[in-house]
Image (cartoon, rainbow, N blue to C red):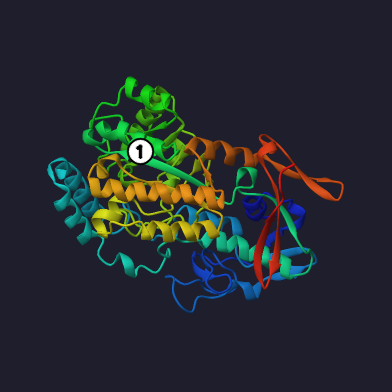
Amino acid sequence: MDRALSEHFRCPEEFVKIETSGALSEGPGFFQFGPGVICYGKYSDAIPAKKPGLGLPDALQFVEVAGDQFCLPFDLTQVAKNLRYEHYLTTSSSHGKNSKERNASRRLYYFLRPILPVSVRKHLQRIRLKGWDNIPFPRWPVDFAVESLMEQTLAMVLRSGSVERIPFIWFWPHGFPSGAIMTHDVEAAAGLDFVPKLMDLDDSFGIKSAFQVVPEVRYDAGKSFVDNVRARGFEVNVHDLNHDGSLYLERKEFLRRATLINRYVKEFETEGFRAGAMYRNQDWYEAFDFSYDMSVPNVAHLEPQRGGCCTVMPYFIGKILELPLTTIQDYSLFHILGDYSIDLWKLQVDLILKRNGLISFIVHPDYVIDKLARQVYADLLQHIVQLRDEHKIWIALPSDVNRWWRNRSQMKLVRAGDGWKIEGPGSEQARVAYATLQDGRIVYNVESGS
């Protein structure tokens, strides 16, 4: 039985008996599962397409129902993994055609980067990112392919009439509609010096955040700095090794660096990590010892490495929990798009909130030293406070989200009279929810706490 749906919703398997039917295609490709639900993987009833676009074969019409069991013409677990792990990309930043040339260019850029002013860097990056707004998949400004896949599958079960509603463990503690985290990647010495003022600004809005620090080369973030940040209730995580863009270029060198990163994670007594410039190779994460990662964008059109995990929910990469970046970085907003407003942030937040996802931000101390940029950030903080007050979203540290999501993955629903109760670590924070169909769409209802 395919457990992808029961693991996503944390619902009893008796409600969602999913199997794979037919001989799957030799190679993976794109298809859809109902209108607008883009998938990538092997498919049994047609040849999947090489590129996303119009006219994709629709797997929904080939679903087989036998009693309370549903047979899909694809492997649901594998398709969800392909999206989250970015396996739909035919090449990565370090593999495939012209990879040597790309790697050489990256090394040259990072060699020269310390002497390049922001004005020059953003000009080079705009050239590199040209055409970003024409990329069809993942969908800008937020992609919900994984959520849409799961909801379409759940809707299929409900439409069959085998059950009127499906109980599950709600995504967030205490019935919060969404979670939100603020993170700050410290890129250079000037940013490190600005950290105390940035903590003051965050504190003035009642928001605690996480600071990711580079352990080698760029600056010296010693024990006193780490202790001071933590003493104020903020969080410290490791940010790459030396932020030279080369972490994932070669497997042997990656393993050497991963050993050093694990050592710094232990030395800093932290749980989390983020790679420099959001470079990543999720298939190599088994070499890491940290608990959670924050290096994978939801949609990476404006990142040096294209792609995106196509989800706004945390997910496990082996033993590591991924907290995806679901909004645009401040650097991209200010220096690539030239936008000194929070309009795009507000749009992304609104979309994520409607799907009950994780709203995650990166704002660099280095790029809000300027008064104009700092005021834009203050406007963002004010908007987050408004969301907290009006929508009751959960504003947390990344380590809190990591702890909750790990606990939730160990919880289970058990029958209690005519209803359900939740058992497992941290179950006192959890809430029972129900998924139903309303006008053909999935609707969630969350029970109030006792």
Residue 170 image position (x, y, % from top left): 65, 49
- Answer few, some or many: residues within 10 Å of disc 1's Cα (few below 14, many 20 plus, some between 14 and 19): some
The vertical placement of 67 against 317, above or below, is below
The vertical placement of 275 against 33, above or below, is above
Q: Residue at x 44, y 46 (%)?
A: 283
Residue 329 image position (x, y, % from top left): 34, 51
Q: Quadrant of the N terminus?
A: bottom right
Q: Quadrant of the C terminus?
A: top right
Residue 214 visible in this rendered orientation of the protein: no
Q: Residue at x 59, y 69 (%)?
A: 44
Left or right? Give the position of 244 relative to 79.
Answer: left
Left or right? Give the position of 112 relative to 430.
Answer: left
Name the residue at the left extreme: 115
Q: SS for tag 1?
A: helix
Q: Residue at x 78, y 69 (%)?
A: 161
Q: Which residue is mark 1?
A: 201
**Number of numbered discs present?**
1
Name the residue nearer the viewer: 446 or 44. 446
Left or right? Give the position of 364 relative to 432.
Answer: left
The vertical placement of 390 against 235, above or below, is below
The vertical placement of 93 against 50, above or below, is above
Name the residue at the right extreme: 417
Residue 374 visible in this rendered orientation of the protein: yes
Residue 198 image position (x, y, % from top left): 33, 37
Name the residue at the top extreme: 224
Residue 62 image position (x, y, % from top left): 65, 74
Task: Kindly identify the amino acid type of the residue bearing the numbered disc 1.
Answer: Leu
Q: Residue at x 34, y 20 (%)?
A: 223
